[in-house]
Image (cartoon, helix red, strand yellow):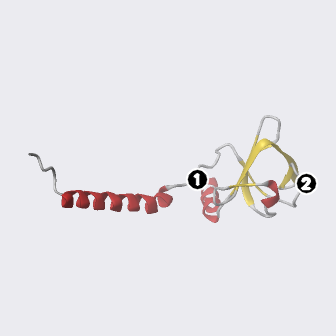
């Protein structure tokens, strides 16, 4: 009769797999970096406007239907949660409406400033 592998062999293998899984879970945010739209313009948000308008720089723009605003934690927020004075990248659609707004983190701002030079 075949007895099969010993239970302690499974424990050792499972311990190694759990250690690898824990490493990947905690190390993943370090490797992750937001993909910023390449064709986006940079600006600073101005005073709050009535929905569906948003002020970026001196321009008051309309948010396109289905337009997305993403905060610095990469979470989708509403137009009312967009704070004045935020550094953003924004993307316009072919009608000149704002399709996407990405609030920049200080690290992203520094990276974009160094890339501009």
Residue at disc 1, secondary structure: loop
Across and down, in percent, residue 89 comes to 71, 52
State whether residue 101 is above or below residue 81. Answer: above
The residue that label 2 is drawn on is 50
For marks 1 and 2 on the same chain, the one whose residue lies earlier in the sequence: 1
The alpha-carbon separation of the residues under discs 1 and 2 comes to 29 Å
Quadrant position of residue 94: top right
Give the labeled residue for mark 1: 34
Q: Are marks 1 and 2 in contact (CB under 8 Å)?
A: no
Q: Position of residue 106 (x, y in %)?
A: 64, 65
Task: Let me know if residue 90 appears in the view.
Answer: no
Q: Is residue 56 left or right of residue 7?
A: right
Secondary-structure class at tag 2: loop
Residue lying at 64% horizontally and 54% vertically, measured from the top left: 116
Q: Position of residue 54 (x, y in %)?
A: 85, 52
Left or right relative to 74: residue 5: left
Q: Considering only vertical position in the picture, is 60 above or below 26? A: above
Q: Quadrant of the N terminus?
A: top left
As drawn, which residue projects farthest toward the front? 1
Between 22 and 97, the one lying in front of the other is 22
Left or right? Give the position of 18 relative to 106.
left
The residue under the point 58% across, 53% down is 34
Q: Residue at x 82, y 39 (%)?
A: 96
């Amino acid at each position: 009769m075949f007895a099969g592998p010993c239970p302690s062999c499974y424990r050792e293998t499972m311990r190694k797999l759990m250690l690898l899984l824990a490493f990947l879970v905690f190390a993943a945010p370090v490797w992750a970096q937001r993909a910023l739209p390449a064709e986006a313009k940079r600006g600073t948000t101005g005073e709050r406007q009535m929905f569906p308008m948003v002020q970026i720089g001196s321009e008051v723009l309309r948010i396109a239907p289905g337009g997305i605003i993403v905060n610095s934690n990469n979470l989708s927020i509403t137009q009312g949660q967009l704070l004045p004075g935020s550094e953003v990248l924004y993307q316009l659609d072919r009608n000149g409406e704002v399709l996407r707004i990405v609030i920049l983190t200080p690290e992203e701002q520094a990276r974009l400033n160094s890339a501009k030079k």
